[in-house]
Every structure is written in C-alpha cells, then in structure tokens.
Amino acid sequence: MVTQEIELKFAATPRTLGRLLEEPLLGEPHGEAQNLVAVYFDTPRFALWRRGIALRLRREHGRWVQCIKYAGTVQGGLHRRIEVEHPATGPAPDLSLLDDPDLRARVTRAAGTAALAEAYRVEVTRHSRLASPAPGVSIEVCLDRGVIRAGKRRTPVSEVEFELKGEGPAWRLYPFALAIAARYPVRVEQRSKAERGHALASGAQPEPVRARLAVVRPTMSANDAFKAICWTCLNHLQANVHGASLGADPEFLHQARVALRRLRSGLGAFEKLFPAGSIEPHARAVRRLTRALGPARDWDVFAEEVLAPVAQQFPGHRGLEALERASVRLRQAANRAARRALRSRSYQRLLLGFAAWLGEAPWLGAEPDEVRQAWEAPVREHAVAILDRYHRRLLKRGRGVASLSLPRLHRLRIAAKKFRYAAGFFALLFPRKRVEPMLDALNDLQNVLGAINDCAAAPAMIDAAVAAGRGPLRPQARLFISHWNAAVLAKRRAALKRVWRTLRATERFWR
C-alpha cells in the first residue's frame, strides 16, 4: 500500500503526555494502547539513509509490516513522506515484497552489495486518538513513550504526533496543533524517530544549516514566490533550533537569527500587496524573537572578534583576564536566555501561527480583484519594482559614506541587508552572469558594514563586562580594548569607501 504521510510532531515530557491522555480536544481513544517495536535496517555505512530512504519492519497487532519511507520533506515542522507498506513474514527485510520495480531498483541500487542489518530500533507504547477539529478534517493523534536503541546506546522517546487522514488540506494540522500548544508545554519536533535513531547509531552530530536564498523561479506568481520565501526561512530557522538548544556551536544561533532576518525581509518585500497592518502581527512576533536572540550573538562576536585578539597580544594581563572571565559569564547567560526563547511557547505560537497563515493564504480571498490579480501575476514585475526601490534607498542612505556617523551607517547596513536578501530571493529571475556582480558587491558591503557595527557595539559590551567583572579590572584593560577597537574601526571605514565605489559602479541586473 502506497500512501503519503503528513504529520506534525511535538516533543513533550512524560508528565505532559499523561495530561494529554485526558485532553478532550484530542478526541476519543482510537483502539487499545499498543506496544510497538520498529526495527530499522541499513548498510554498515548507512547507504540507504544517505539516499533518503528508511527501511523499517514494525510489529503491530501481532504481525510484522515492512515499510519503505522516502521523498521526505519538512516544512514549518510539517513532515511529508511517501510510505510503501507490505505484510512481512518476520523481522527481516525482504526487498522482493516491493511490487513497484522502480522503487525496488532504487532501494537495491542504494544498498549495493552491502548486507542489510539492524541499525537501530524504536520501542514505544502508543495511545491513539481520533480528532475532527473541523468539518471534513480527520486527525489521528498518537502519544508515544518509549526508547530508541542502537547497540548499547539509547535515548528516550516522549512525543505526540498529529497525522492528517483523508483528503483535507495539510495546513489544517496547524490550527489544531496551535490550540494544543497554547495549553501544554510541547515543542515542535523537527526530527523524526528515524532521524534520531540514525544520529544515535552513526554518532553523527548536528551541523549548522545554511539556507538557499534563490528560491523564486520564473514560473512563479507573486503569491507562489512569497510563500516559497517564507517557507524557506521558516525551515532554515527550525533546522537550526535543535543545534542552538544544545548550546555547543554558536553558528546554530547565528543561522537562526539570519533566518529570522530573512523572514522579516521577505515580509517587507511583499507588504504593499497586503492591506495596511495585516502582516504586522507576524512581523512583530518575528521581530520580538530576533531581539531575544540578539544579545547572545552580540556576546559571541565580542568575545571572539574583539576581546580575544587583544588578549592574545597581551598574554597574562590580569585586567584583560578578568574581563574575559566576566565576558564568559555574560555570554553564557545570554545564550541561556536565547535557548529559553527558542523553547518558549511564544516561539511555538510564532512557528505554528505563521505556518497556518501561509497554508491558508487568506489574502487571496479577502482582497479586491486588482489585488488578487497582482498576487496571481508573474512575480518578475513585482521583483523589478522591489529591487528598484531597495536600490534607490541604499544609494540615498549611502551619500557621503566616508563621513557618515555610526547611527547613519547602521541605517545604511539595514538598507544593504534588505537589498541583499531581496536580490538573493529573486536572483533566478535574471541571467546569472548579470546577477553575480551585484551579489558579490552587496556581500562585500554587508560584511564591512557588519564589522563596523560590531565595532560600534563594542564600547557598551566593554562597559557591561567591566560592571560585571570581579578581581583586578585595571583601567589599562579598558584602554587596550578601546584603542584596539578604534584602530579596527578606522581600518574598516577605509575599506567601506572601496566597496561602496564598487557597488555604485555595478550594473543593475534587473534592468
């Protein structure tokens, strides 16, 4: 049997799962509780996994069922994948059961000559419910508690799944999940059990995920383009949340902030097609989360790019060492606050609410005909207007760039960033050879302006570290860093003049 699985997953504590068992919104029990054992098979080098294939045998209702999952995607926390199931005679894979020759060839080619063996297994007790939150919408709710095992390693499972049944639109899962998230401390789970099992078995560590900016294609309407940009940004954000929650690599947090800034830029690029104020609730939620993550990133930059180089030049300086210790404490506190923000209910509301809004697309049915036509028109005309507007604004804010104050340079940086994101979003609409010089010039400008902004922020960071410090915080330490920062700032101002001249001379690729 071939089906498409569409589901949202939430991590929850065992205590929360117990409370959810009594929640009326989840509907009536759907059968008895089941003890499920799912065994996942792969080659020793995880060849199936590397090709996007999961091969599972699960014992349910006293029989074994073989399942192949592939073509998996995650969009705003919503998992989609193709499932192919066949009854099996035992807990060993049998590729001859695959009656689709193309799929059988795909799995066989992926495995090659390597033998398939158990990679990990999932053992859970599942309680099922069946909910109908709206006419024609049926959602199976599965509350799973158990463990994933890979050899001697193990990790607990405590989650709730909402799986769409029937033909209803997938976005219907979001309002239902949002109602549950408003009442219980659950978190959207980006990783499937198979992903968690693979990580456990292979020892793979999460890596920061970067997003592709160029997601708008010539065949898209303005509506298609807007949704593609927003989905890409939401996916970029969510893909880095787990790594950011671990707190090991600051790049996860940086990428999460980049995703939020790009999402804000995506909203801004299409705001004139919306009624006044209609996107502000979403923009405000994104802005609030961006600000909550800001201090952690600021302390990461200060510690690594401002304080560390000075400390290397003056090893053993007691004042600098005391400043470093104070900075470490402030950096750790800021990172803890950022992780709390990404685990908070407000973040769950942002993600689920935004995804529900994108899925429903209410702007298509509530507007006058001319606005609807603008949404349905090819996106290129809209892109040209946006790029023209952002380019003019950038040139205006960059007049007299050599003598601009730091606050005005900050405004220039924001304008450059919006233009850079928009140029990246719409890059595929224009010839590549014409686009690349402008993207390169904008990248150089954004890097220099970002570095200047870091220098501008450093005095306040130094003051905070001095105020929080303990021990011999000598005046020389502040002077060393301040003088170093001033010298770096002067050097970066000089570089700004060069990259600005290059940008002004770069051809407008959209004309």
Image: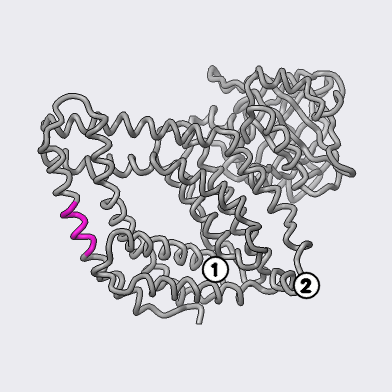
- Going by the numbered disc 2, the residue's amino acid type is Asp
Residue 63 position within the rendered picture, expressed as x and y whole percent measured from the top left: 82, 23
Residue 204 position within the rendered picture, expressed as x and y whole percent measured from the top left: 48, 34
Give the vertical position of 159 relative to 493 (above or below).
Answer: above
Q: Which secondary structure, mark 2?
A: helix
Residue at x 22%, y 40% (from the top left corner)? 308
Q: Residues within 10 Å of mark 1 (few under 14, many from 20)?
A: many
Please give the residue where the numbered disc 1 appears in the rendered image: 426
Q: Which secondary structure, mark 1?
A: loop
Q: Which residues are magenta?
A: 486-493
Indicate yes or no whether the magenta region holds residue 490.
yes
Secondary structure of the magenta portion, mostly? helix
Residue at x 67%, y 74% (from the top left corner)? 378
Pick the front one: 345 or 32: 345
Indicate yes or no whether the magenta region holds residue 53.
no
Give the vertical position of 257 relative to 432 (above or below).
Answer: above
